[in-house]
Amino acid sequence: MIPVAPTRTLIRTPAGTTASSAAFARTCAPRLLSFAAAMVLAGCASLPRPEPAPVAAAATVPAAWQAPLPHDGQLTELARWWQQFNDPTLNLVIESSQRVNPSIASAKSRIEQSRAATVAAQAALLPNLGASASASRGRPDLSAPLGTSLSAGLQAGWEFDLFGANRAGRDAAQARLDGAAAGWHDARVSVAAEVAAQYTALRACEAQVAQTQLDAASRAETSRLTELAAKAGFQAPANAALARASAAQGNSLLTQQRAQCELSVKALAALTGIDEPALRTRLAESSAKLPQPAQIAIARVPADVLAQRPDLYAAERDVLAASADVAQASAQRFPRISLNGSIGAARFASGLGTQDGTVWSLGPVSVSLPLFDGGARRANVEAARARYDEAGALYAARLRGAVREVEEALIALKSTADRNADAVVATEGFAASYVATQARYQGGLASLFELEDARRTAVQAQSALIELQRERVAAWISLYRALGGGWTPADLQADARAK
């Protein structure tokens, strides 16, 4: 690398005084400027132009959804979806989690970091200005008298971005800022889906507890009656032992189910940051009641729907940023030209008098020509191209994964809808069979084994129905998450206007 730095300096002095720098500027500066221009033109002619970044890996999406679309019930908008569950407690826990979740806070911090990097990248395209002041006392040379020198001035510099290196850096920084903002929205959507799923699991667990309590109470009553019958000689001692065992098992299942609910409450308290006693008070208002899902319309083609996913938008910004990095690395292989200048006031006071004047300079014009660096710049370009290819591959993979998530959620919704009617019929039938068997047992027409078998099937059917209801709500939540939670790129513009 050869730096070429012609400088023109003029010093205004009292009449009759000759400034050697002024003479140098008049005679040598034009030649040096001509030499610098020639070197720049030679560099532009000899070095290869930066090539455009390679095209990212092709990422295609199907023209239509392969899974059935949900059309049951009223279709609603996706934005602020959880508020449509008609469950104030769910709204409370989600809003609280948005304020305390570390993932959202971390995403917000990344936005601030990216914004600062963008400001720095934009500043590289502008001139810089600085000020300085100095004071000294002494003899500058043997012919000069002892004196005091004072000076104050301004310095300015500007790099000519002829080959677009700084512009590419600015574009990369802006793309990363947009991606960070989309990442913040994606974190909010993910947290809302996670909290809604945990809340639904808790409500289903409470419903299971209520069902298990009824079963345990029924077992205990059967055990009591069987014990009395055995003491009176109407039942065998083995039947009494079986009834006691069944009652004990019912109590054990109830204790286990309650413990699972306690764990869910602890998890929800950690996710929301709400004080646990206050959270339990709010949860008690609608215990064992599963939220009713707000249904979503997704009749559009996959490409249109997936455009509202913030994580895909962020991945696309990563590709654009990597492309700008390639352009910046390529531009670093070309000459760099910068211009500097200064202006200031100077005073020299000695026993012979005082001299005042204005000192200014135009230059140096610095030209840096990369001649030999052992292949470092070429390696930087290749590394940037590799990162671009990686970003393109990750974007394509994330796009395919997004299509898969939507399709899986649609399949889950279709499956739960198809199974619901059969599950309701099975639950009602097994419950009726248990009631009939219990009446027969009390009349001495059925054995305790028949009663326990009928009880077991009825409890399993009811538990399966509750689990199916939870699964269906979870499928709607998964679809909400897969569709991006109602986010659109226009939200970035709205956030920018708000700030």
Image (tube, rainbow, N blue to C red):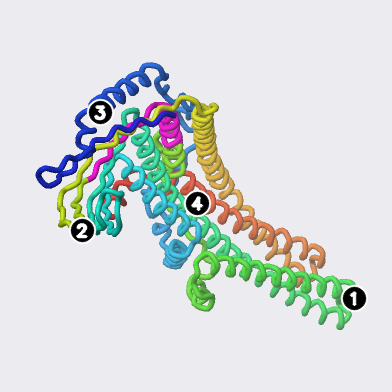
Residue 392 percent across, percent down from the top left: 50, 31
Assess disc 3: are there few (<14), some (14-19) or many (≥20) residues with their C-alpha within 10 Å of its C-alpha.
Answer: few
Residue mark closest to the camera, 2 vs 3: 2
**Residue 490 in the image, given as x and y percentages of width and height:** 31, 44
Q: CA distance from mark 1 to mark 3?
A: 121 Å
- Position of 157 with respect to 307 (left or right) is left
Between residues 12 and 125, which one lies in front from this camera angle?
A: 12
Q: For numbered disc 2, what is the local secondary structure?
A: strand
Quick check: marks 4 and 3 in contact, CB under 8 Å?
no
Looking at marks 4 and 3 on the same chain, the residue that comes earlier in the sequence is marked by 3
Q: CA distance from mark 4 to mark 1?
A: 52 Å
Residue 73 at least partly seen: no
Left or right of 340? Residue 440 is right
| Residue to which mark 2 is pinned | 350
Examine the rendered structure and indicate whether residue 45 appears above or below residue 461.
above
Q: Residues within 10 Å of mark 2 (few under 14, many from 20)?
A: some
Q: Name the residue rendered at 29%, 36% in the picture.
A: 364
Q: Earlier in the sequence, mark 4 or mark 2?
A: 2
Residue 91 shown in magenta: no
Query: Residue 496's spot in the image, x, y percent?
Result: 30, 50
The residue at which mark 1 appears reads as 237
Eye-nearest disc, 4 or 2: 2
Q: The residue tagged with tag 1: helix, strand or loop? A: helix
Label ID, residue 28: 3
Which residue is the site of mark 4?
477
